[in-house]
Image (cartoon, rainbow, N blue to C red):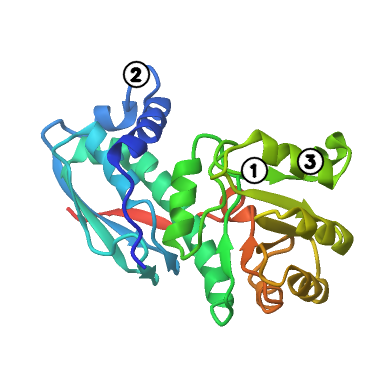
Amino acid sequence: MSVPPLPLIMIEPSVRAALLEDLGRAGDLTTDSIVPASARTECAIVARQPGVVAGLDYAMTAFRLIDPSIEVHVERPDGSRLTPGDLIATVTGSARGILTAERVALNFLGHLSGVASATRGIADAIAHTKASICCTRKTMPGLRIAQKYAVRVGGGSNHRFGLDDAVLIKDNHVAIAGGVRNAVQRAKAGVGHLVKIELEVDTLDQLREAMDLGVDAVLLDNMGPDTLREAVAIVAGRAITEASGRIRPDTAPAIAEAGVDLLSAGWLTHSATVLDIGLDHRG
């Protein structure tokens, strides 16, 4: 399924901040001293390892913020599967502008493609089940919008975007509230009727109590496949079931086969390996 692109107004602040960080107080000393202002060039953005591309709009924004006349022609749009040597896009225009924006453009493109590629790996591993993979709030500060977009590009779905769009009652909330029942009842009384309430449970006894309280979703934390099957049977379709903990490409199939609706993994965003993508001068 095609993922709608993010509006420029959501992309530009992050890219602008990254460029300002890189340019510092004096601009690109290396490029400005070596490359003539009149020089033009064409460069290729090329995949150096297999994966899924994501973040092209971030890369294009970096080039265009430095020099609006730079042209980027996309060959493989976000969501495309890559093999080493694949041409992703060509960049044409001011040599100074392209070289100055290069690192920031590739930083976004490599990181977001890494997130999308990691997500795709899990999505492919559980494609034979009804489950889907989703991210969490364990995102890099300032990059949540971008990283959650990359998860969607990789075939995953998004958990809540922040503290304000859903209720997720975790162990510390339960402990401070004095129990599951108190926590759930207070949440129901404190939010509007359109706000979903999810409860994290560590045991099947907690899960049974949650079902009596009518939560919308349950986060089944660090349960093995056999326990997850029991949990799914207890829920019996009355709530969304989400498994978390130890979600990797090699463990995901057995967890998904237990019958849960979602698998969530924080490492997709906070620890995904950068996809190796380069910018090569063509002349």
Mark 3 or 2, nearer chain start: 2
Decide which of 66, 190 is in the foreground and name it: 190
Quadrant in which residue 131 is drawn: bottom right
- Circle 3 packing at 10 Å, graded few (<14), some (14-19), many (20+), is some
Which x, y percent locates residue 216? Answer: 65, 55
Q: Spot the residue most to the top.
A: 25
For label 3, the residue is: 183
Q: Label 1 sits on what residue type?
A: Val
Give the Cα separation between the discs numbered 3 and 1: 11 Å
Which x, y percent locates residue 142? Answer: 50, 34
Q: Spot the residue most to the left.
A: 38
For label 1, the residue is: 167
Q: Nearer the viewer, mark 1 or mark 2?
A: 1
In the rendered image, which quarter contains the N terminus? bottom left
Q: Spot the residue most to the bottom.
A: 128
Which x, y percent locates residue 8? Answer: 29, 39
Quadrant in which residue 68 is drawn: top left
Q: Secondary structure at mark 1?
A: strand
Q: Secondary structure at mark 3?
A: helix
For label 2, the residue is: 26
Q: Label 3 sits on what residue type?
A: Ala
